[in-house]
Image (cartoon, rainbow, N blue to C red):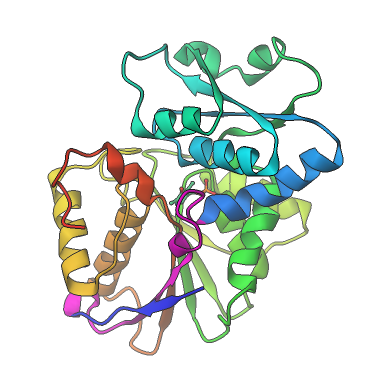
Amino acid sequence: MPIQQLQSHLFNGVYADVLRIDTIHPIISGNKWFKLKYYIEDCKQQQRKTIATFGGTYSNHIVATAFACKEAGLNSIGIIRGETIKFLSHTLQDAANYGMKLQYVTRDLFKNKQAIQQHFDNNIYWINEGGYGIKGMKGAADIVALSATEKYTHIIAACGTGTMLAGLITTAKPHQNIIGISVFKNNHSLETDIKSLLKTVHCSKPFSVNHHYHFGGYAKHPKELIYWMNELYSAEKLPTDIVYTAKLLFAVKDLCNNHYFNKQDKLLIIHSGGLQGNLSLPLHTLSF
Ligand SMILES: *Cc1c(COP(=O)(O)O)cnc(C)c1O
């Protein structure tokens, strides 16, 4: 997987590389391919024919699951939060095009996953919202296992459910610090959710999560964030997505400029993908 070294003044002279896993696949962009692969394998092994999972209107996980199921010859069902909307988001439109059956549930019902599952066939293979779970963690562990990453002192990644971060923590070397940047506002259970995954593989490596860079909440993209995405692209030719990686790179820039890192530190920033999410923006919002 390509590694891009950041060159510009934006990062205050701190050595920072970006692992471009966004480039591995145009649709199952980035971490979703890693997070899904062991679920798909398990589903096939159990000889089940249909995968169902949960997500919101802009969920990368939904569209990635739809595509991965199509590729694997499996049926897919997406349980979508919120009543049917007149116009499908780009994300849901794509998922539907890959053959996913979309079923809308109220926000209240969406919180009660068990009640939803009762209405479906017993043979369905369920994946948690966002791919949270042990198999997702194990898949994400392969992200850094596939590249030479020993030289880095810090590995930094965006967090939704924290599944990817858990995977990164399990493969990190003892000298490496793992930092997650949460894109949710007030996700107080994130650290606990990560720790409960780690516990299943007896991993007690410390990590930290920063909750200060959500820009107002999940998928919120105020003008400053759009400005930053264009500034970053023009300085580094690095495209980012509004939900995860733009906030991640902003956080790294801000921490660099606040002397959070030492000059001898070497950062590895995980570009986890998600660029398809930018298609929901009005045309010409972004310069890339
Ligand atoms: C889903 C996603 C994440 C978050 O992954 P988690 O394992 O849920 O923390 C990060 N970046 C991108 C681009 C994603 O699509």
Residue 210 horizontal/vertical position (percent): 40, 55
Q: Is residue 65 left or right of residue 245?
A: right
Residue 61 lies, with reference to residue 254, above or below; the image says above
Residue at the far bottom: name it: 264
Residue 100 horizontal/vertical position (percent): 56, 27
Q: Residue at x 75, y 25 (%)?
A: 124
Residue 282 lies, with reference to residue 154, above or below; the image says above
Q: Residue 246 versus residue 27: which sits nearer the camera? A: 27
Q: Is residue 229 left or right of residue 101?
A: left
Q: Residue at x 58, y 52 (%)?
A: 33
**Residue 174 in sight:** yes
In which quarter of the view is residue 252 placed? Answer: bottom left
In which quarter of the view is residue 222 placed? Answer: top left
Magenta segment, which residues?
A: 9-30
In which quarter of the view is residue 78 placed? Answer: top right
- Position of the C terminus, as image quadrant, is bottom left
Residue 171 horizontal/vertical position (percent): 66, 69
**Residue 169 in sight:** no
Q: Is residue 76 left or right of residue 43?
A: left
Q: Is residue 29 left or right of residue 239?
A: right
Check residue 25 for magenta coloring: yes
Residue 213 horizontal/vertical position (percent): 31, 51
